[in-house]
Image (cartoon, coloured by chain):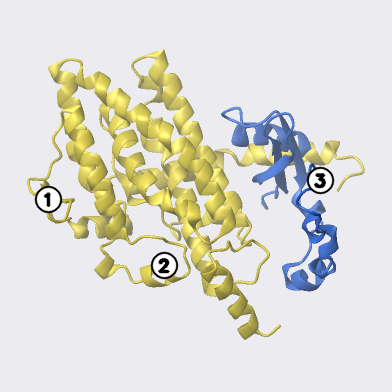
Amino acid sequence: MTTDTLENHFEQTIDADQRIEPRDWMPDKYRATMIRQIAQHAHSEIIGMQPEGQWITRAPSLRRKAILLAKVQDEAGHGLYLYSAAETLGADRRDLTGQLITGRQKYSSIFNYPTLSFADVGVIGWLVDGAAICNQVPLCRSSYGPYARAMIRICKEESFHQRQGYELLMTMMAGTDGQRAMVQGAVDRWWWPSLMMFGPPDTDSPNTAQSMAWKIKRHTNDELRQRFVDMTAPQADALGVSLPDPDLSWNPEREHYDFGAIDWSELKRVISGDGPCNAERIARRKEADENGAWVREAAAAYAAKHAGGKS
Amino acid sequence: MSEPVWPLYEVFVRGRRGLNHVHVGSLRASDDQMALHNARDLYTRRNEGVSIWVVRSDLITASSPDEKDPFFEPAGDKIYRHPTFYSIPDDVLHI
């Protein structure tokens, strides 16, 4: 078949809202875009284990420790679902990890902020995972089948993440003045970075049009950001915290919340490597990879020894 | 030192008794046993399965999407394989 016929068939499949599956023909650019997006998402899950993982040994109760362990284990699982999806496109996950630790592929800017108190664990669940859910629910209908299916699994599990965070914060808000101050402090630090998770504004997002045409993305960055603000503002009221934005208010005409201007220079700075924890996060991931090398080697040697007649 | 490459495995999970095993994704493991354990940890953290199959991806033979239409064509024109092909009078019941 000629490339034109193949491309036609691909476009028709997308237009009919059918999924593209691994062995289908697809334009090189679609494949490259999917690998980049899925890898970046996988890396975010894996790096995302670090900010909260630091609190596992310091969780204030066995209950909170068990919950946090399960949550961080889920993040690892999400990373693996996504590397699995990337491999269906011909990417190799060892190679992707290499690209992450040498800085050639990116991960979500949000994980370059530090977790200064235990309230941060709750706020990450509520705001960061809440924003992730807003982003990810539409991706369950993404045009690439394996990615969409991975997102369905992930979204089911993210709901636990968000609820445990909110419950943790409710518990702290019912505690002492000191605990309430910790929650407010964490909200003040994480609110704006959470809004930046949706990416640059639509006016500065050159790939959005192509991704929407290919149904990789279903909504623009600004649409999803607005949806998140609309969901979250009432939750902040219920919790009894204030969001650090004097311009945040309900606009009855738009039937949405208005909110203040985002400092995009901060997002650019953090993405380009100059956030508070960029170097630390990559160094930790690299260290884990290097420390695991002998285990991978030993397991391969064991497998070879016991393989018998098998290759 | 060249790093050993662990083979890719495809994972199939039976959600509960009475259902088929369904493909859920893939993973890397050094051997079959590790693939099974990793599959349990990765794909059944919330009781999603009562049975798991793992099989090395390179052992699977699959139809090619390029020959999709000709490959499945033999079924295309055999509409008499479907029960709706046969018209039965309305007053004949339970058929």
Give the amino acid at mark 1.
Answer: Pro
- Relative to A21, residue B77 above or below: below
Residue at 31% across, 54% down = A224
Chain A's colour is yellow
Between marks 1 and 2 in the image, the one whose residue lies nearer the viewer: 1
The chain coloured blue carries which letter? Answer: B
A107 vs A213, nearest the viewer? A213
Q: Which residue is mark 1?
A: A252
Q: Which residue is mark 2?
A: A212
Residue at 85% across, 62% down = B80
B74 vs A276, nearest the viewer? B74
Q: Which residue is mark 3?
A: B95
Same-subunit check for callouts 1 and 3: no
Q: Are marks 1 and 2 in contact (CB under 8 Å)?
A: no
Residue at 43% across, 57% down = A103
The span from disc 3 to disc 2 (Cα, nearest Å) is 48 Å
Between marks 1 and 3 in the image, the one whose residue lies nearer the viewer: 3
Give the amino acid at mark 3.
Answer: Ile
Percent position of residue A158, x then y: 43, 37
